[in-house]
């Protein structure tokens, strides 16, 4: 019976709703509870300078520690959060948490230790009339300077018309930096780069995959590197910074450096980690700097 099938019975009453939508609605209910019960956590993946592995920033990534299902990856619940509108409070939580944490790192390790904190923003959030005010409040409450915040948006989110465009320009005017995330996977990438106030381009992982393969056929290797090369040339021409995503091996990092990429993010460089682990990383970096400083003094 419908009762035995539990919420699956709902399908019969809502014409045209497929399984994914149903799953989203169930997940949506749980997500609402998760928000109230502190089941959501923010982890941080360092962004490193390829040249010397120095941490130049972090990207905040949300995690859901479900009481019975265990850790649920964002790919599984962000779409549900977007459909139900819960992405707005969820996104606000991540934003506030990331700003607070970045300001704390800045206070502990100095303002130069961690220049940037990236936060992912969904299209739905950019449509929210309160979004700009939420961002302003997160910055004011945390004390994080606006130029330390990077909002990561995808090309498809940016393409959603007038309101989104106005919001992005307003954020830009406030001094907040914008990054085009997963760059190259969306549509009309090239015109977007000129039309929108992005200052950073994040090369999608799919263009880093296989970039290191050397099968003795230069033409084939060139073809695998073509998009990464084109993106960095375009970025340089337009005065944009770049970050290569999904760097999984030292060989990939080496090829990216050859192509002109200075910043990278990926499992080879650093995994997403807790705020405490980032603090340890920054503490070690500070120690390295102190050891290096007197040595440099001797050279003088
Ligand atoms: P993204 O913004 O492109 O974030 C990078 C994703 O790639 C992260 O997955 C990260 O863990 C993963 N990654 C990093 N390095 C590597 C690597 O070397 N190899 C592989 N295979 N993966 C790597 P994650 O945390 O599962 O997040 C997936 C996506 O979910 C994000 O993609 C972003 O679009 C979305 N997301 C995550 N957190 C939030 C959030 O707070 N708000 C919104 N709106 N979206 C979020
Ligand atoms: Mg991102
Ligand atoms: Mg990305
Ligand atoms: Mg991605």
Image (cartoon, rainbow, N blue to C red):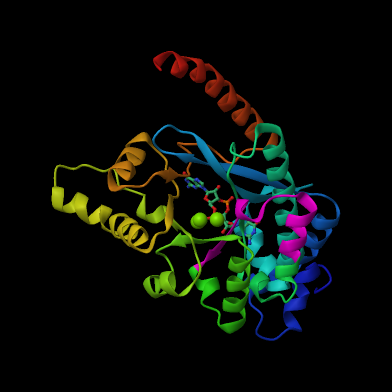
Residue 143, magenta (yes or no): yes
Quick check: 188 above or below 91? below
Residue 241 pos. (x, y %): 43, 54
Image-based side of 127 in relation to 6, left or right: left
Residue 69 visible (yes or no):
no
**Does residue 193 show up?**
yes
Query: Residue at the location (53% across, 24% down)?
Result: 289
Magenta stretch holds residue 107: no
Image label count? 0
Of the 4 image quadrants, the one containing the C terminus is top left
Q: Percent from the top left, x then y, of residue 199?
A: 48, 60
Q: Residue at x 71, y 44 (%)?
A: 103
Residue 40 image point, x, y percent: 75, 50
169 up-or-down from 108: above or below: below
Task: Magenta stretch: give its range.
Answer: 134-154
Q: Looking at the image, which residue is at 67% across and 39% down?
A: 106
Q: Is residue 263 above or below residue 8?
A: above
Residue 216 or residue 13, whichever sits in front: 216
Query: Which of the pair 24/143 is nearer the observer?
Result: 143
Residue 176 % position (x, y): 61, 60
For this rendering, which residue is in front, 84 or 91? 91
Relative side of 59 to 292, left or right: right
- Hey, which quadrant is residue 84 in on the image? bottom right
Could you say which quadrant of the image residue 255 lies in?
A: top left
Query: Looking at the picture, does residue 173 appear above or below residue 227?
Result: below
Task: Give the residue at x 48% y 39%.
Answer: 48
Query: Looking at the rendering, in which quadrant would you find the N terminus?
Result: bottom right
Residue 204 location, quadrant:
bottom left
């Amino acid at each position: 019976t419908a009762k035995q099938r539990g919420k699956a019975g709902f399908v019969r009453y809502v014409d045209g709703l497929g399984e994914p939508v149903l799953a989203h609605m169930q997940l949506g209910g749980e997500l609402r509870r998760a928000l109230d019960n502190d089941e959501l956590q923010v982890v941080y993946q360092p962004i490193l300078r390829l040249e010397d592995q120095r941490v130049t920033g972090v990207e905040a990534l949300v995690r859901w520690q479900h009481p019975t299902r265990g850790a649920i990856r964002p790919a599984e619940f962000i779409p549900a959060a977007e459909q139900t509108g819960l992405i707005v409070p969820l996104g606000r939580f991540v934003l506030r948490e990331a700003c607070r944490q970045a300001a704390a790192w800045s206070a502990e390790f100095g303002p130069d230790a961690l220049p940037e904190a990236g936060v992912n923003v969904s299209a739905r959030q950019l449509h929210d009339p309160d979004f700009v005010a939420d961002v302003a409040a997160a910055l004011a409450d945390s004390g994080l300077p606006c130029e330390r915040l990077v909002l990561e948006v995808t090309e498809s989110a940016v393409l959603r018309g007038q309101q989104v465009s106005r919001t992005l320009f307003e954020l830009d005017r406030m001094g907040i930096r914008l990054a085009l995330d997963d760059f190259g996977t969306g549509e009309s990438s090239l015109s977007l780069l000129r039309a929108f106030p992005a200052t950073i381009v994040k090369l999608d992982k799919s263009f880093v995959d296989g970039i290191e393969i050397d099968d003795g056929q230069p033409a084939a290797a060139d073809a695998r590197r073509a998009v990464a090369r084109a993106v960095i040339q375009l970025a340089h021409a337009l005065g944009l910074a770049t970050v290569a995503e999904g760097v999984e091996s030292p060989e990939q990092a080496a090829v990216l450096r050859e192509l002109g990429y200075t910043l990278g993010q990926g499992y080879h460089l650093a995994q997403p980690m807790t705020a405490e682990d980032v603090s340890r990383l920054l503490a070690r970096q500070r120690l390295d700097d102190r050891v290096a400083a007197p040595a440099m003094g001797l050279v003088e």
